Amino acid sequence: MPMCTDSNEIGTDASNLWTIDERLAFHDYLASDKTLKSMPITGSDSTRVPDLLATRLVGLPVLAAEG
């Protein structure tokens, strides 16, 4: 997934996250290295930056970060 982008900005073929986990290929929203505040799905004022944020079709957020 290109850094500082989300699935609204890039095409479905721009990332190969399915090689890590095939469930990441099926998402509603996917973002990489963006602040929570800048993501339209969060409604957050936080300036924290997750490495990867994905929501699956069932609506459960999946967060992944170092540590």
Image (spheres, grey):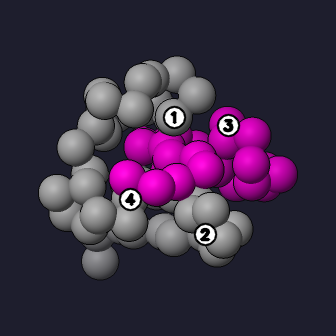
Lower position in the chain sequence, tag 2 or tag 3? 3
Q: Which residue is mark 3?
A: 38
Q: Is residue 44 visible?
A: yes
For mark 4, give the secondary structure.
Answer: helix
Q: Amino acid at mark 1?
A: Ser
Given this view, does label 4 or label 3 mark the residue nearer the observer?
4
Disc 2 target residue: 61
Query: Could you tell me if the residues under marks 1 and 2 are in contact, i.e. CB atoms within 8 Å?
Result: no
Cα gap from disc 1 to disc 4, whole angstroms: 12 Å
- Type of the residue with mark 4: Leu
Residue 48 shows in the view: no
Question: Would you name the residue on which mark 4 appears?
Answer: 24
Q: Residues within 10 Å of mark 3 (few under 14, many from 20)?
A: some
Q: Position of residue 24 (x, y in %)?
A: 38, 59
Return the mark for residue 7.
1
Q: Whole-Å distance between the Cαs marked 1 and 3?
A: 13 Å
Quick one: label 1 or label 4, which is nearer the N terminus? 1
Residue 56 pos. (x, y %): 57, 63
- Specify which label sits upstream in the sequence, 2 or 4: 4
In the image, residue 45 lies at what x, y percent?
78, 50
Look at the numbered discs 2 and 3 and tell me whether their residues touch, using CB distance below 8 Å.
no
Query: What's the magenta region?
Result: 25-49
